[in-house]
Amino acid sequence: MKFTVAIDGPAAAGKGTLSKRVAAEFGFAHLDTGLLYRATGARVLDGADPVSAAQNLTPEDLARDDLRTTAVAQAASKAAAIPQVRAALVQFQHDFAGREGGAVLDGRDIGTVICPDAQVKLFVTASDTVRAERRYLELSGKGQDVTREGVFRDLTERDARDREREAAPLAAAQDAVVIDTSHMTIEDAVAAAVAAIRTAL
Ligand code: CDP
């Protein structure tokens, strides 16, 4: 069975947690497409050319332990605005989406560009302050030296860049179900996503 769930939304909206929970619930495979851009950004910070970095990503690049830093997130967002970088990452995402047994992909352009025919499209969002607080707690909990102001700035800068770029901007697909998690528990958000998927199945 081929079945694709596309989950898009701004930075730190809870896409990752939601995607993992939904994939586990249905036994689908999960791809965090942000990791591809973060791995590209990390190589750029090492001095690589963004396009050749994206074209030559290795499994080791995707397993680096510095991918969740704010510096890498910013480098990812800058590289992600380059059309040739995005083009280099399309095939991998298409192959993943087309695998047997169902797939969940989360990112910015999954429902609009990568998988416009996905059976389920979700757009997960939350207010800027809620997203910044969640990300601050996540990063400081991992021992990263971050401030609330710095995290807020990173998210709002990246969202603006991601929304305003010409190549596959961050946007909800017209047929996406919007889940605003500002006042929801993760359990509520998972239940909303599972309900949308069950309907489509
Ligand atoms: O975890 P968070 O939501 O903060 O970010 P991410 O999903 O890991 O994505 C990092 C950056 O990669 C984003 O700010 C986007 O610029 C870029 N990205 C993208 O352009 N397209 C995707 N499908 C996924 C990520």
Image: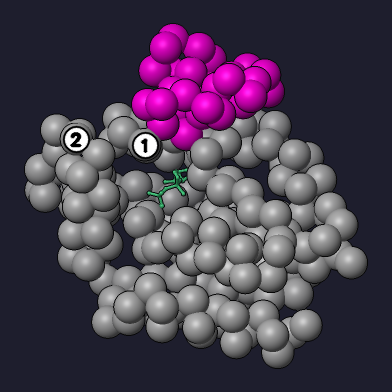
Residue ID at (52%, 39%): 35
Find out if the beta carbon at label 1 lies less than 8 Å from the nearest ligand 1 atom.
Answer: yes
The kind of secondary structure the magenta stretch mainly shows is helix
Residue 1's place in the image compared with 197, above or below, is: above
Element type at mark 2: loop
Find out if the beta carbon at label 2 lies less than 8 Å from the nearest ligand 1 atom.
Answer: no
- Name the residue at the top extreme: 47
In the rendered structure, find residue 68 and report the number of the disc placed on it.
1
Mark 1, Cα crowd under 10 Å, few <14 / some 14-19 / many 20+, is some
Which quadrant of the figure has residue 131? bottom left
Which quadrant of the figure has residue 101? bottom right
* Mark closest to the chain's N terminus, 2 or 1: 1
Magenta stretch bounds: 38-67
Q: Which residue is mark 2?
A: 143
Residue ID at (24%, 59%): 134
**Where residue 62 sits: x, y (%)?**
56, 29
Residue ID at (41%, 31%): 67
The answer to whether residue 66 is magenta is: yes
Which of 83 and 175 lies nearest the eye of the viewer?
Answer: 175
Element type at mark 1: loop
As drawn, is 154 to the left or to the right of 94?
left
Residue ID at (49%, 66%): 18
Residue 173 seen by the camera: no
Q: Which amino acid, by three-letter code, is at mark 2?
A: Gly
Residue 149's place in the image compared with 26, above or below, is: above
**Where residue 145 sits: x, y (%)?**
14, 33
Q: CA distance from mark 2 to mark 1?
A: 12 Å
